[in-house]
Structure formats: C-alpha cells, structure tokens
C-alpha cells in the first residue's frame, strides 16, 4: 500500500472536485488516496477511495485571528489530513519550523494527521547542504510528542512544479536521512512521501525506492486522467 496525496493549491472548484471524487470512487486500488484542497471545497465528501484533506491549519485554537481556520473547524468538516509547512507556505508566508511544528501539534490535538513538508532550496542543494537542511527541518518541524499519526513529505523545492526530479540516489539518500532522523526521535515507521514533478511515468520508479512510502503530487493531481494513472502505477 502506497500513499498518494494530491495538492490542488489554489486551483479547482467545488464542481471540479465533485467530478474528481466521482471518478476516483470507481478506481480499484489498494493505495491510500488523499486530496488536499482549498478550504472552500472541504464540504465535498470523501468516499471509499479518496480522503479530502486541507492545505493549512491555524496555530491558534480560536479567537480574533481573521481569515484563520482552526483544527477544530477542520475536524468538524470531517478532515483527517492536512498539509503543514508546504514550501509555498514557508516561502510566501514566512513559515518557520516553529510555526510548522505548532500547526502539526494543532492537527494532532484535533485527530488530524499532519503531512509535514520539508525540502531544500536550489542554493542549499548547490552548497551541498541538502541532508543537513532536511534533517534540521524534520527535527524542528515534527512535534516532540506525537499522539496520533504523522506523515512526512520530502519535497526538494527546486523541483516543485519545474518538471525536474532528483536522481533515484538523491531521493534514496534524502529519504534515508529522514527515516534515520525520525527513528532517532522515536518515530520509526512514519510514512515518508516524495513530492515534486511526479507523473504517471516516473511514479513507479519513485515508489520503488527504499523508504519511499508514497508521493505528494501537485499539478498532476488536478486532472483525473493524470491523477488516476499515478494512483494505478504506484505499486
Ligand atoms: C507540490 O507543490 O506539492 C508539488 C509536488 O508540486 P508538483 O507536483 O507540481 O511539482
């Protein structure tokens, strides 16, 4: 069983998601499928194939935080998964590891599985710092006490939406480093997804790499004729 998570970012509509979930309902797969969508689409129901998840969660529980959505509110909508620390949140909203960890904590407190994203920039990669950066991000972004489930996603920032992917060896090294760090933190067995420019042609090779538990898919999760082959080829 692999985990196939999609990230619609700020795309789509309630109608488009309804069509997607309808098509996914007919897919025969043993994989766990998650689609993380904008808040406005969270009323669209999950079904036996796909779990509808969110893309962000507030660090606050309630109160005067205009525009924020709390973990309890997500749980009330039936949300079971939420992305935290996606590189676009880190980049455009200055989310630090401390903020990402607080968000993951709020998710866990509300029975929601956080998908905690980590990954190096191009400059960090060029400077040979990839493993150091992702180790630090995992140590600082994953809550110290995990009551419930977490998922970690390795997304090299330079490869997201760029049609680029690291080599199989680079993915293997990154995932081993994350698995070792999680093991040191007492979190053996935490699923680790690979994300960035995954498509129906490369997904089979990627999920066969050691310590890769599944994939996080951006642009290719928006169309059912691209997302469904990814789900089918991930084995
Ligand atoms: C992402 O942004 O999480 C992502 C994986 O994007 P893409 O698949 O489009 O590279």
Image (cartoon, rainbow, N blue to C red):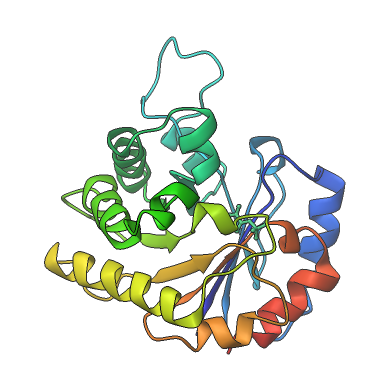
Q: Give left or right: position of 214 versus 182.
A: right
Q: Is residue 119 visible?
A: no
Report ligand 1 position as a quadrant. Answer: bottom right
Q: Is residue 67 visible?
A: yes
Which percent across, then down, holds residue 181? Answer: 20, 65
18 over 184 or under it: above or below: above
For the point 71% across and 42% down, the residue is 41
For the point 64% across and 70% down, the residue is 198
For the point 49% across and 54% down, the residue is 81
Which percent across, then down, holds residue 206? Answer: 54, 81
For the point 38% across and 61% down, the residue is 152
Residue farthest toward the front in the current orientation of the protein: 127
Which percent across, then down, holds residue 119? Answer: 42, 54
Which percent across, then down, holds residue 105? Answer: 29, 42
Front residue of 108 and 186: 186
Number of marks? 0
Image quadrant where one finds the C terminus: bottom right
Q: Give left or right: position of 98 versus 94.
A: left
Quadrant of the rendered structure where residue 5 is? bottom right
Front residue of 105 and 25: 105
């Amino acid at each position: 069983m692999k985990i196939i998570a999609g990230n619609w970012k700020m795309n789509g509509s309630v109608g488009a998601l309804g069509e997607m979930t309808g098509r996914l309902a007919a897919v025969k797969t043993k994989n766990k499928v998650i689609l993380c969508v904008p808040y406005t689409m969270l009323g669209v129901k999950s079904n036996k194939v796909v779990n509808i998840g969110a893309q962000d969660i507030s660090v606050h529980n309630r109160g005067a935080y205009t525009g924020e959505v709390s973990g309890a509110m997500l749980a009330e909508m039936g949300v079971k998964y939420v992305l935290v620390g996606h590189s676009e949140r880190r980049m455009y909203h200055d989310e630090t590891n401390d903020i990402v960890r607080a968000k993951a904590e709020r998710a866990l407190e509300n029975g929601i599985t956080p998908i905690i994203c980590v990954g190096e920039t191009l400059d960090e990669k060029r400077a040979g710092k990839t493993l150091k950066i992702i180790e630090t991000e995992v140590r600082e972004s994953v809550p110290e006490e995990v009551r419930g489930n977490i998922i970690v996603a390795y997304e090299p920032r330079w490869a997201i939406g760029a049609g680029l992917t690291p080599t199989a060896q680079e993915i293997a090294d990154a995932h081993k480093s994350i698995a070792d760090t999680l093991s040191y933190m007492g979190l053996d067995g935490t699923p680790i997804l690979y994300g960035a420019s995954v498509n129906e042609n490369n997904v089979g090779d990627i999920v066969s790499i050691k310590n890769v538990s599944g994939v996080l898919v951006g642009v290719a999760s928006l169309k059912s004729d691209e997302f469904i082959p990814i789900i089918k080829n991930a084995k």
